DNA sequence: TTAGTATCCTTGCATCGTTCAGATATACCG
DNA sequence: CGGTATATCTGAACGATGCAAGGATACTAA
């Protein structure tokens, strides 16, 4: 292979990718959806983006965790966006909370591996990525906001937020990780279950 | 090194370990407590038990997942035992549920890596280990039993069980994985939070 | 045009789970 | 007691992984 031939090849597969960072994230999302979180290796990602496994280092991501953090962050953005959309126009606090909860669990079931990455232990310490924690807090504050601006504020808003958040998250992870099967619910669908559960809080929500 | 010398050495570090299976499980529990779930490799486990990394295969565990499943199973046994102990002598259903919940979250915080292994995604498919699923169901059925034998049976027991289980598990995982910090609770301790949350269900428990 | 920098490649290392062939101790059978 | 069979463990090696170091290449600005 002559040098000119080599140059020709690299005119197609450009030596400088252009914007490898975004390409990596979108490719990671695809791999995630296809092969799960276990299939998301730097080598697989390199093959998907037409690049060498070490191309991500130093310039774009100093670490695999930084890559995973970036992917997780887009996940949190999408989750917050979807939740906000699904909850717009809710007549009262209770239905708003219901919609937020249903949206949460729907996102998890429709984007299972991404959800697992977002809330799993793949990225070892969140402390390294303060931006991630902030983005992750967005969907949390959606619930919090819905509770704090109800008429009376009967129960402490912070407390109720954590309770509802925990309930949704617990059910979601148990279902996603297949520790809990829908036939154990005593209700037909997962969404119906969530609604019924929110109903248990009853008077505490008004 | 002569053959006899070699034989002498192996009288101390016996060629046949004796009961490698149990030794492996207990050593795995120690490694888990010391280095977390990420530090539990077959090579580290081999060094801890004084054996070659390949010694576990064929005879004791055909797979690393089988080893992890065995460790997780002892974890579930301990969890169910502790929950049963902590809940004995509860005067009514509500306090019994409270104690079960508190015991659950206490186990998780005191055995963090073990809990992460039990409910994480390290062992890829639970379907391979039906025994594990059964043992895991013990602590679940503790809650279920407490709810089904209350006076009236007002709300559907299955439904309430899943709700309470989800709430406890969600809060626990969020705390253990440091997605939720105790200062967000609006309550001093995690246990106080759990009790207060159970109280939200109020009349549904009698 | 040329120097400098950002980006990417090549090579290689340590670790991981796992396989395979062979060594060794225990158990069983005569 | 002796010999063989079986269960158990070792040793070397394979492929895959994340990652470090240094060289190659393209873009950028003087």
Image (tube, coloured by chain):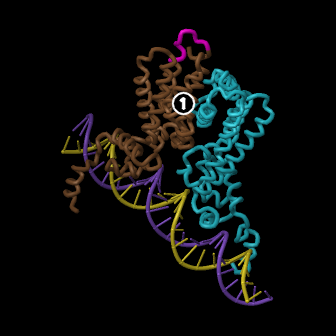
Chain colours: A brown, B cyan, C yellow, D purple
> Which one is nearer the viewer's eye here, B149 or A96?
B149
Residue B81, position in %: x, y?
A: 74, 43
Residue found farthest to the top:
A151
Disc 1 sits on a residue from what chain? Answer: A
Residue B157, position in %: x, y?
A: 64, 32
| Vertical position of residue B66 compared to residue B172: above or below | below
Q: Residue at x 41, y 24 (%)?
A: A86
> Which one is nearer the viewer's eye here, D22 or A74?
A74
Question: Which quadrant would the N terminus of chain B be assigned to in this image?
Answer: bottom right
| Vertical position of residue A86 compared to residue A75: above or below | above
Residue B149 is at least partly visible in this image: yes
Residue A90, position in %: x, y?
A: 44, 17
| Vertical position of residue B114 compared to residue A104: above or below | below
Residue A196, position in %: x, y?
A: 54, 26
Q: Residue at x 42, y 49 (%)?
A: A35
Res D9 quadrant in image: bottom right
> Which one is nearer the viewer's eye here, B71 or A152?
A152
Res A23 quadrant in image: top left
How crowded pointer 1 is (Cα within 10 Å; few <14, some 14-19, many 20+) is rated as many
Q: Which residue is mark 1?
A: A168
Q: Secondary structure at mark 1?
A: helix
Question: Which quadrant would the C terminus of chain B be assigned to in this image?
Answer: top right
Q: Residue at x 73, y 67 (%)?
A: B18
Identify the magenta region: A145-154
> Which one is nearer the viewer's eye here, A151 or B147?
B147
- Count of marks overlaid on the render: 1
A151 within the magenta span: yes
Residue A127 is at least partly visible in this image: no
B89 within the magenta span: no
Q: Main secondary structure of the magenta part?
A: loop
Q: Residue at x 45, y 32 (%)?
A: A76
């Amino acid at each position: 292979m002559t040098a000119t031939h080599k140059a020709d090849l690299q005119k197609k597969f450009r030596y400088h990718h252009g914007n490898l960072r975004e390409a990596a994230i979108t490719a990671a999302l695809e791999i995630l959806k296809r092969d799960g979180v276990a299939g998301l290796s730097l080598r697989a990602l390199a093959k998907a983006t037409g690049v060498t496994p070490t191309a991500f280092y130093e310039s774009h991501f100093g670490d695999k965790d930084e890559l995973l953090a970036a992917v997780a962050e887009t996940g949190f953005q999408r989750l917050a966006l979807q939740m906000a959309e699904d909850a717009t126009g809710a007549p009262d606090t209770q239905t708003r909370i219901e919609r937020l909860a249903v949206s949460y669990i729907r996102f998890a079931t429709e984007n299972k591996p991404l959800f697992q990455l977002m809330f799993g232990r793949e990225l070892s310490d969140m402390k390294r990525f303060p931006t991630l924690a902030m983005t992750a807090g967005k969907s949390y504050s959606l619930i919090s906001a819905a509770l704090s601006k109800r008429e009376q504020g009967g129960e402490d808003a912070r407390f109720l937020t954590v309770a509802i958040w925990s309930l949704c998250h617990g059910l979601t992870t148990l279902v996603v990780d297949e520790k809990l099967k829908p036939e154990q619910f005593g209700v037909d669908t997962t969404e119906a279950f969530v609604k019924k559960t929110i109903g248990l809080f009853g008077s505490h929500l008004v």
